[in-house]
Image (cartoon, rainbow, N blue to C red):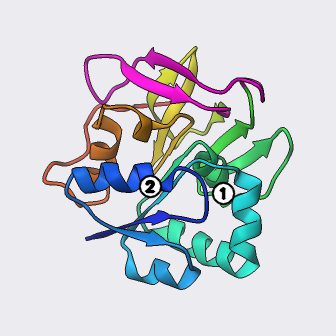
Amino acid sequence: MKIGVLALQGDFDAHRRRLEELGADVVLVRKPEQLDAVEALVIPGGESSTFLKLLGEKGLEKLKDFVRTKPTFGTCAGAILLASEIENPAQTGLGAVDIRVRRNAYGRQIASDVVSGPTVLKKEPLEMVFIRGPVIERAGPGVKVLAEYAGKPSLVQRENIMAATFHPELTDDTTVHEYFLRLAGAGAKKPANGVKSSS
C-alpha cells in the first residue's frame, strides 16, 4: 500500500520520515494526478489558505474526490482543510469531516506549545505539539473524539478520515500514525475499539 503525503508546503517531510519508520511505502504528492497512485493520504500542517492557492480549482476538486473514498489524515492546516466549517476567517474546505474549526485559536504569536491530553488510543496521556493550532469548536454526531486538550477535541475520526489540531509528527510518540496506518489497512492490527463519539 502506498501512502501519499501532500508535499506542497509545511512539515510534510516529518510525516514522511515517521511513516517510513513504521514501514510504510510513502509517495510525496506534488501534483493532483499523483493522487491516483496512492491509497491513503496525509495532509500536513502549513498554511491552509496557501494550500488552496497551490492546489488551484482542479487540484482541490481532485482532492475532494480522493477524500470521499480513501483514508485521509490531516494535521493542523490539514485538519482545517478537512473541516465542514472554518472560521477566523471563513474559508472554503473539503467538507470531509463534520467539524467546525477556528483558525489560529491560540493566537498568532504563540510559536508552539507542548502539552498532554487524554486519548482513547492508549492508557497514558498523549503528547501534543501545537503550532498556531486551530480549535475544534464543534464535532458532529458521526465524529469520534480520539483525544482532547483543554476540554476540546484535538484528534477526531469520521469513518476512514482523521483530523488533528496538533502535530503528532513532531513528537517521539508513534501512536497516532500507527492508528492511521491501521485505519488505512496498511498495518496488521485493526483500529482501536471503544472510541467515543462526541455529543
Sequence order check, earlier mark of 1 and 2 = 2
| Residue that appears at 66% across and 27% down | 111
What is the total number of numbered labels drawn onto the structure image? 2
SS state under label 1? loop
Residue designated by label 2: 13
**Which amino acid type corresponds to the residue marked 1 in the rendered image?**
Gly
Give the extent of the magenta segment.
106-134
Confirm or deny contact between disc 1 and disc 2 (CB under 8 A). Answer: no
Q: Relative to 93, say whether 177 is above or below.
A: above
Residue 16 makes an appearance in the image:
yes
x and y percentages locating residue 10 in the rendered image: 59, 52
Q: Is residue 141 magenta?
A: no
SS state under label 2? helix
x and y percentages locating residue 125 in the rendered image: 35, 17
Left or right of residue 43: residue 56: right
| Residue that appears at 52% across and 64% down | 6
Q: Relative to 29, say whether 168 is above or below.
A: above
Residue 95's label in the rendered image is 1
Mark 2 crowd level (few <14, some 14–19, many ≥20, 10 Å Cα): some
